[in-house]
Amino acid sequence: MNLPAATRAVYAVFILSGFAFASWASRIPSVRDSLELSPQSLGLVLLAMAVGSVIAMPLAGVVVGRFGTARTITLMALLGATGLALAGFGQSIGVLPVAIGLFLFGAGNGTWDVAMNVEGSAVEQQLGKAIMPRFHAGFSVGTVAGALIGSGMVALDVSPSVHLSAVAVLVAVAAPTAVRSFLAIAAPEEHEERRGNPLAAWTEPRTLLIGVFVFAAAFTEGTGNDWLAVATIDGYDAADALGTFTFALFLSAMTLGRWFGPAVLDRYGRVATLRVLSLTALVGLTLVVFGGSLPVAMAGAVLWGIGTALGFPVGMSAASDEPTHAAARVSVVATVGYVAFLAGPPLIGFLADDVGTLRALTVTGGLVALGLLVSGALRAPEPMSSAGAGRLVSEPPVDRSPP
């Protein structure tokens, strides 16, 4: 078992996933113009990707349990690449091929997401120290790279068909190559439990509580991604550039929090760290909404980003604490989290019509408080023993020796 190589492989698939998503997102305006779509029509087309992910994620645990993480990512990379290329070529034909392509891309990406989190958690457990947040920071790096290259393609007047097809080829080649270095863990035939009722994990109290926590974390993160710039511009009469800069501060703080957060997790444990960060996010939100001036709101955006950084990745780690059931539980938690990413932006939009965009963000504070209340569910189960199986400990035993 080559643990450093496996670690690099997990980084690679997280980066590739973010890169593929951002590459598509960077060409949405071009596709809209090519198809002459109204905002409502564009929203319906984009919904196809969300539908593909929501359908695939609840079943992802079964797929990963049967085929393993490496083969699952290989298959889903090929499926997602096919969908991405179809969407790219379809924009010169009509709406239907784009919608079909996005559905396939969403389905592939959703299952890929579950598989890479399962593998990432396995690497984390072998290392004996927290690293999952850094894998998610890798996803963020991939999105930045995809967006920057996409901007360059637009500036050079490269068509979406050529651009997205090139990205599809890269994903189809690079992902199957990377997974060759994955850990040889939990072969499907070794754990018949994985082949049981695919809905069984949805009835486990701890898994559902972790799902509630991840729902709150995803809602908080998604609200910042989609509404922070708009809220800053509308609420403080800020110039567009300053509103975008405030959003950039939020993203930078979140990415840095994910990179440096594992050291804090190893020192203080999950629950204590997440509770402090939840309070940090609440303070940040309060400054953004009620700070009264743009500089104060910018400081709040930084605190909000830091406070949000670890919730989603640590939730994935908690769902994977028991490797035998990791795929099914990550599938549940990822599905719940993705629903929050989908539900959050429209809810804020509806509220903003009545109370204004800035004040609408206060609902996010309620979700942060909910996550704070259920954060105890993320304590790692004590290793099974005859003395007492299934007990929870304040933090997992950690081997802090270098890998």
Image (cartoon, rainbow, N blue to C red):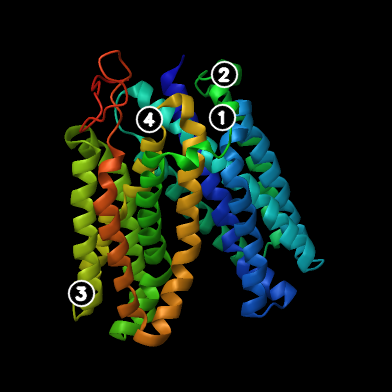
* 160 to the left or right of 325: right
| Residue of label 2 | 187
Q: Which is nearer the N-term, disc 3 or disc 2? A: 2
Dot 2 and dot 4 residues touching (CB under 8 Å): no
Residue 98 position in % (x across, y down):
73, 62
Q: Tell me how far mark 3 sits from mark 2, CA to CA.
A: 53 Å
Q: Secondary structure at mark 3?
A: helix
Tell me if mark 1 has few (under 14), some (14-19) or many (20+) residues whose alpha carbon lies within 10 angstroms of its own: many
Q: Nearer the viewer, mark 4 or mark 1?
A: 4
Name the amino acid type tagged 2.
Ala
Q: Nearer the viewer, mark 2 or mark 1?
A: 2
Residue 217 position in % (x across, y down):
35, 54
Q: Which is nearer the N-term, disc 4 or disc 3? A: 3
Name the amino acid type tagged 4.
Asp
* 83 to the left or right of 248: right
| Residue of label 4 | 321
Tell me if mark 4 has few (under 14), some (14-19) or many (20+) residues whose alpha carbon lies within 10 angstroms of its own: many
Q: Which is nearer the N-term, disc 3 or disc 1? A: 1
Residue 3 position in % (x across, y down):
42, 20
Residue 295, labelled with which disc? Answer: 3
* 324 to the left or right of 76: left
Q: Nearer the viewer, residue 384 or 401?
A: 384
Residue 69, labelled with which disc? Answer: 1
Q: Which is nearer the N-term, disc 4 or disc 1? A: 1
Q: Tell me how far mark 2 sits from mark 1, CA to CA.
A: 9 Å
Q: Is residue 106 above or below residue 315?
A: below
Q: Secondary structure at mark 4?
A: loop
Residue 336 position in % (x across, y down):
47, 51
